[in-house]
């Protein structure tokens, strides 16, 4: 597959990443604490398993490319205080939830969860387990910043039941690391990786990034070669989203130092050739896994799902999320917490919960969410099951979407055959564009974005 640059340029446009549908910019302040409390009580009767998410917003230093909700601080007292409120929120939700519901997944993200000292990792881990009913084989994962990590923190994670870790590697080139203020030599990453292996973590993911300043095809070839030598179980490779109007600190990255569009596209090709060449399987849009990994099995069996953490093996779960900015999700709603830690803590102190916005899905939202999720996860869409599930005639219901999809089909990004829409190998580079055809909110204003309308990162 050698897509020509003109085609790639044509489809490089702002668009959502579809970790939710509708995307988070459509959440509304009309959905707050009373609505989330009501939803928690209503969901008591459901047998659906639970997936828990815990957000630790602190980092030692600021990576200039960062798109997360985080606070850079050297003051550990802030974390100590935050943990107190986090536990209170966990207690408030656990008191409203059905204690019999099984937790099949727990993920700590951030910020940097490994900002926490070993004793606080143990205390928080034990607190969560005391409030919820964990499956014996629950996937318990944590995001790790290799810099400054101590072996005792890795041991504390393992003793707290963590069995998966995701290491922020991003790029191994020194010039790139300096330009984004994230210095972490290969020797450090190798040492930390060895600790997780030695402690018996069953799955280790590396997060990598493309589109960072000073990256070249050659420098990235070297990064990939070293990564492949270490053989992590999974890789998630994200394109840097330069959105300084949303993330002011990204102004510290000079646009002139970012790789050209053609270089970024050549890097995509290099990634595919290199990783598939050594046996990794491409998952969804931007993940790779060893053939025996559960993500590969989930993709094969069409149980792969997509949520705010990316691709996951569990489809029918409710997500209860804790901490500043975190987003809970049930079949019917999204509920997002206050983003600023101080305000989050105040809300929890006053009301036990900290929801400040959210969204209740309409029937149309749910149908479109199914379509978009299937395209993003399965790379194909079978019309008949959707028609049966939602009592619709697909081609009538999605007449406008299919019209919007037609040029993408003409450009070879999708193929249709009777009952099915299939994403081609080329189309995989443009999954977000394909999904946008079915996004009622994206299609609604056909003209230039209105003031205040959501502004997204580029799709390619
Ligand atoms: S460690 Fe992660 S969350 Fe923290 S600043 Fe860097 S990229 Fe952002």
Image (spheres, rainbow, N blue to C red):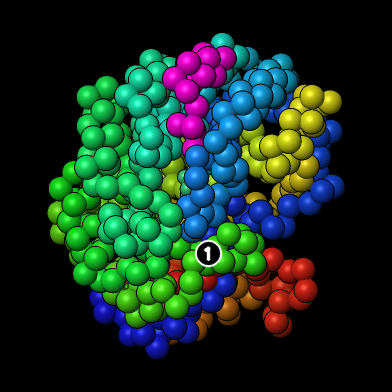
Residue at mark 1: 252
Residue found 84% across the figure and 26% down from its top: 350
The quarter of the picture where residue 451 lies is bottom right
> For the residue labelled by badge 1, is the local secondary structure a helix, a strand or a loop?
helix
Please tell me which residue lies in front, 36 or 205.
205
Location of the N terminus by quadrant is bottom left
Residue 93 seen by the camera: no
Q: Is residue 347 visible?
A: yes
Quarter of the image that includes the C terminus: bottom left
Give, as a single range, the part of the protein colored magenta.
112-127
**In the depicted structure, whether residue 80 falls above or below residue 112:** above
Q: Is residue 120 magenta?
A: yes
Please name the residue shown 24% across and 65% down the image: 219
x and y percent of residue 284 in the render?
39, 56
The secondary structure that most of the magenta stretch takes on is helix
- Tell whether position 338 is magenta: no
What is the x, y in percent for residue 136?
41, 16
Q: Position of residue 353 (x, y in %)?
A: 76, 29
Q: Residue furthest front?
A: 74
Q: Position of residue 443 (x, y in %)?
A: 66, 73
Q: Residue at x 51, y 49 (%)?
A: 62
Q: Does mark 1 have its CB less than 8 Å from ligand 1?
A: no
* 9 up-or-down from 85: above or below: below
Q: Quadrant of residue 156?
A: top left
Q: Name the residue nearer the viewer: 295 or 412.
A: 295
Going 37% across and 74% down the picture, which residue do you hit?
259
Can you name the residue that lies furthest to the top here? Answer: 130
């Amino acid at each position: 597959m050698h897509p020509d640059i003109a085609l790639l340029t044509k489809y490089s446009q702002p668009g959502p990443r579809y970790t939710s549908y509708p995307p988070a910019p459509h959440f509304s302040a009309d959905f707050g604490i009373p609505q989330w409390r009501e939803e928690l009580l209503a969901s008591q009767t459901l047998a659906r398993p639970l997936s828990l998410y815990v957000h630790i917003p602190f980092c030692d230093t600021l990576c200039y490319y960062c798109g997360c909700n985080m606070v850079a601080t050297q003051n550990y007292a802030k974390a100590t205080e935050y943990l107190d409120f986090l536990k209170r929120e966990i207690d408030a939700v656990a008191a409203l939830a059905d204690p019999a519901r099984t937790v099949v997944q727990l993920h700590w993200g951030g910020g940097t969860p490994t900002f926490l000292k070993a004793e606080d990792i143990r205390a928080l881990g034990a607190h969560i387990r005391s409030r919820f009913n964990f499956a014996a084989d629950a996937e318990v994962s944590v995001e790790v910043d290799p810099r400054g990590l101590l072996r005792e923190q890795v041991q504390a994670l393992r003793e707290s039941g963590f069995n998966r870790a995701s290491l922020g590697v991003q790029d191994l080139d020194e010039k790139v690391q300096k330009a984004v203020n994230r210095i972490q030599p290969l020797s450090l990453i190798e040492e930390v990786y060895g600790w997780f292996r030695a402690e018996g973590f069953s799955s280790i993911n590396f997060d990598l990034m493309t589109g960072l300043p000073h990256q070249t095809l050659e420098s990235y070839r070297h990064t990939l070669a070293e990564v492949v030598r270490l053989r992590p179980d999974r890789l998630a490779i994200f394109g840097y989203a330069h959105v300084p109007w949303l993330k002011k600190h990204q102004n510290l990255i000079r646009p002139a130092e970012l790789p050209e569009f053609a270089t970024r596209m050549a890097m995509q090709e290099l990634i595919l050739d290199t990783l598939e060449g050594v046996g990794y399987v491409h998952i969804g849009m931007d993940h790779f896994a060893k053939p025996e990994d559960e993500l590969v099995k989930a993709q094969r069996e069409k149980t792969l799902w997509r949520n705010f953490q990316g691709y996951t093996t569990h489809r029918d779960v409710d997500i209860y999320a804790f901490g500043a900015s975190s987003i809970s999700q049930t079949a019917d709603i999204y509920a997002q917490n206050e983003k600023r830690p101080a305000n989050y803590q105040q809300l929890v102190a006053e009301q036990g919960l900290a929801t400040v916005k959210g969204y209740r899905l309409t029937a149309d939202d749910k149908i479109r969410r199914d379509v978009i999720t299937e395209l993003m996860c399965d790379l194909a869409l079978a019309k008949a099951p959707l028609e049966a599930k939602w009592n619709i005639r697909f081609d009538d219901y999605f007449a406008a979407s299919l019209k919007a999809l037609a040029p993408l089909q003409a450009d070879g990004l999708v193929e249709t055959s009777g009952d099915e829409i299939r994403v081609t190998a080329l189309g995989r580079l443009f999954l977000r564009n394909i999904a946008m055809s079915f996004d009622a909110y994206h299609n609604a204003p056909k003209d230039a974005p209105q003031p205040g309308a959501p502004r997204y990162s580029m799709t390619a």
